[in-house]
Amino acid sequence: MCGNFGFLGKRLPQDGSDLLPERVVEICQTMGRETEIRGEQAGGGVVFARDRDGRVIFVGKKVVNLKRRNLTQSLEQTFATTRRQATKKGAKPLDEAIVGIWHYRYATSSPPAILETHWHEWMPARFANVWRVENGQWICDRQLVNHRITHNGDFDAWTIFDESIENAHLGLWLQRVLHTPNATRGDSPKIAGMMDLLITQGMWDASLRLAYQLAVAESLEDAFGGKQPSASAPNTAPTEEQISDWSAIAEQVFLKHKDKLLLPYANSIVELSRKHVNQLEQELLQTLSQHSSIRQWSTAKQSAWIKTAVHVFFHNNLYQATKLFLSRAKGSFGLVTASTLSEATLVVSAWGQPIATGFNVQDNYMVYASEPAAVDAVLSHIPRSYRLDLDQKAGEIAWVGVDHITVYSMLEDRELRSSELEERWIPLQGNSYILPPEEQATDPVQRDIQEIPKVLKSIELSWRDPTSFNRQTADYFAELLIEQAKNWDHRQRATVNFKLEPVTDLPCLNLMITGVESSLWLGERFAEDLISLFPALTVKTISANQLLQRLQYGWKGLHLGKTTIVLAISQSGQTFPTLQATNALEELRRQGHIGELFILTGEMCSLMGTAISQYYYQESSFTRRILINGSGRRTAEPTTVAVAAAQATLTELLLYLAKRLRERFPAHQGCFGMTLTTTELLMLEQTKDEFIHRAESIVGITTKGDLNRSSDYQQLIHSSRKWAWHILETPFAWGIHALYILITVGLNAPLVQTLFRVLFSLANLPLPAVLLPLLTLADILIYIFGPWLWSLGLRYIQHRPLLARTGKRTLVIGDVPWIHQLLKVYVSKLFSLSYGIASLDVHGANPQDHMLHHFGHRVVRGTLIFLGVPDGRRSLLQKEDENAVLMTGKQATGVQHLNTGAEIIALGHNSAIAHQGFQDAIVLSSDPLPLRETDDSTVDRQLTLEQLREARFGAFERLLASYVFFWALAKQVASFPLLRYQHWKSQSRTRIMTTAAPISRVTLDLSKHPVERNQSK
């Protein structure tokens, strides 16, 4: 979960002598703020410059972010100081270009530390003779050689000696081959070491060293004295002295041949005469084969060594070295490589990890970022700006300069033509596929909550429009289900007419839903409701991580078939496991092993969209496979509007599919055993239409952004303040006690003694000596137990339970699974940066099931229990559910000590919950539906109707109310003096999981894992 971003552009006259002009700093800070959602535990930045002697150098800085600091601000403050210090020491900017590289890190392979933070280098900067060609002439410079990389992803292994060398052993090997120790533990530093090994153009020592490993050495153990790789094994790789001797000989031979090597009018080192290169190889072989260390090699090895060394001497620049590295690498790579030997260029690569590049034509610069939104934030308001997303699935390597870009496709093993790249340019203005960047907010959680009604309204309007993207996708989805329904109906008729034996094997799935965390929980709820509507529909939900494992090692039990529809859900459209599962599933779809693949994301333009071949240039056609919840990109980690939008979108899809299938199969039973009639579906539609007004009332703002301080909203805010004081009382009491000590000790006036002296003085009586020890003891007890005494006083004044335990409170959220899971994550993130003296332990459970078993024995004085109660007035089944929740609450209330137990807030729609003996009840306004007595079939449909109404709307209202309640609570805690924190983020800031979480990406081998046959045929 890391992020790359950077800048490469022409230096303008107004840029002055700053290594990074102010305009570039602003651009990169904008990208940094967008990249923070990939993790902000640590970060580094580096810029190209020249030293006093005109040699190209790197000027860089790394920081490990403090827990409650902002990484973008912290890094720029320290990096700016480093740049100023470098300037004072004689560093100057490049004349023609500005090149800056940044990386934000979330630690995966090693803990956060300066040493482990990107950028990375393996060998320190060193002087070397470097040959180059300029104006058809050979030039040898004494240059400072330094290579640096930044990397997002996982580097697992590299192939050499016909075997895959895992990361740890590769690091030990590099230390011997490069004769440079390295104390880092992470995987990415090894990439820097590989660049030191592979970048050899114009350098004979580096070329001969690499050629030895590629053509002479036979195994990894050759560098360890034939032993297994270990830190204690001897180093038997060619010594630095040997390599120096070899390069001196090669240099002399090269000097004899160099003037004949270039083709006429050659302007680069690779424009060579093959004839004269062969002559160079022959003389190098004759000369070097006489060296004592080489003489014992076989003739074949000597010849291969020379040919390899000559080739890499002429060709292995930064670009070619990166290509060679990735061609043999295993893992996932959002990789940026830079070298002082390529001062005005960068190589950015995407393979299993994203890299987006953006180009500002009018100001002549390009930017790149792991987070496409970082590019959009910089360029979306600038005319003639374009974005090019590298194809991470096929693997692409881009060599970019001030005025050129070359893109190499790893899959196709060729450089793409300009016309092919032009077809992929994404215009950032006037593009219906691209949403404008999110505006900055001081409280992103509050902003997100307040935008819920507006987003819900936009979703409603989208689904009313037959030409909208969502309706187009839903129509295609419905068409596929209708075809499945026809087959189902045919099988049902055949079973009845011919009395066929039922199929013993489970038929292939009609629908599989995948995602992780909140996306998965929403998908599970959607699947349950879909089955309530269509009991004969076979639907499976599975975590994207589990799906990746099953796809990697065989998918027995997944029951995928040629008609199976898959829905992948991810708000960001780039959550690593869901994205990798999308890539694998799309491959299955293309080969006809599954029916179709749909995705649900927060916005149209996403990496998952790209994975299913949705293009985003203006003329591109719509694939009809993307559902958009319209919430866009959100930076707050405690997610609200994104969940609400996804729930609303899935509700729209559910009702639309039901409507289409009911229209197509109007018979009483419908298809897949459909349970509701057209009339009952219309009732759900009506409830859906009214829901937006309920959302406005709950969040306290209208769809147009006007304040709506309803009774619902006021209840939520008022109740949250009381609980906020439960959390704040400890620091508040400590503050009172500190002030008490300051006054009484500072004035030498202990409270009890001073009061008694004043009283006896007013009575003109001396203070009895016998009382003095007792008064002193009383003052000592106040000093010892003061915080507890102040807490009691505070509770008494605020009418809160006096004898609840002091200290950190425990919160238990009780509601149906998808609600309590979402809220547990939400509240824990709201308090993730809180101070230990004013925080919460957050738990969740289902009060209709296991909550009592999980937490009944853990209830203590002052435990906070937040119960979500279904509306028992709606149906007999919901009445039972309501009673179960209330019973759980009462049983928790019964666990008491000192006549004090848990403090419970009940949240629901039925006013009866206010009379159950709980400390507080938040009753949301509602229109009750009286119970109806009808025939059995109607009762069954009524139960299903109310079950769906509760799942799609009633529980949803409780979720929105809980969002407001806990936001207001956290806001008050986070605003307490001296204990302020940003409640909308966490320390690591991992809004998006973009590396293995924890399953790595899958590579399908369909020959080994044949898909199950469709048993339902």
Image (cartoon, grey):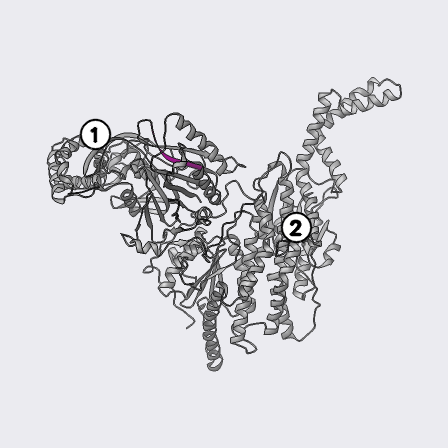
Q: Which residue is mark 1?
A: 244
The answer to whether residue 131 is seen in the rendering is yes
Q: Residue sitting at 78 percent across and 20 percent down?
A: 773
Residue located farthest toward the front when viewing the structure as drawn: 13
Magenta span dominant secondary structure: strand
Rendered position, 918 above or below 318: below
Q: Nearer the viewer, residue 938 or 749?
A: 749
The span shown in magenta is 43-51
Task: Give the amino acid type for the residue marked by disc 2 in the picture.
Answer: Phe
Q: Is residue 795 left or right of residue 25?
A: right
The tag earlier along the polypeptide, 2 or 1, is 1
The answer to which image quadrant residue 655 occupies is bottom right
Q: Amino acid at mark 1?
A: Ser
Mark number displayed over residue 866: 2
Residue 50 belongs to magenta span: yes
Q: Is residue 714 magenta?
A: no
Give how far across and how far down residue 241 sits, in percent: 22, 28
Residue 216: horizontal and vertical position, in percent?
A: 19, 39
The image quadrant of residue 530 is bottom right
Q: Around disc 1, counting alpha carbons within 10 Å, would you say few (fewer than 14), some (14 to 19), or many (20 or more)?
A: some
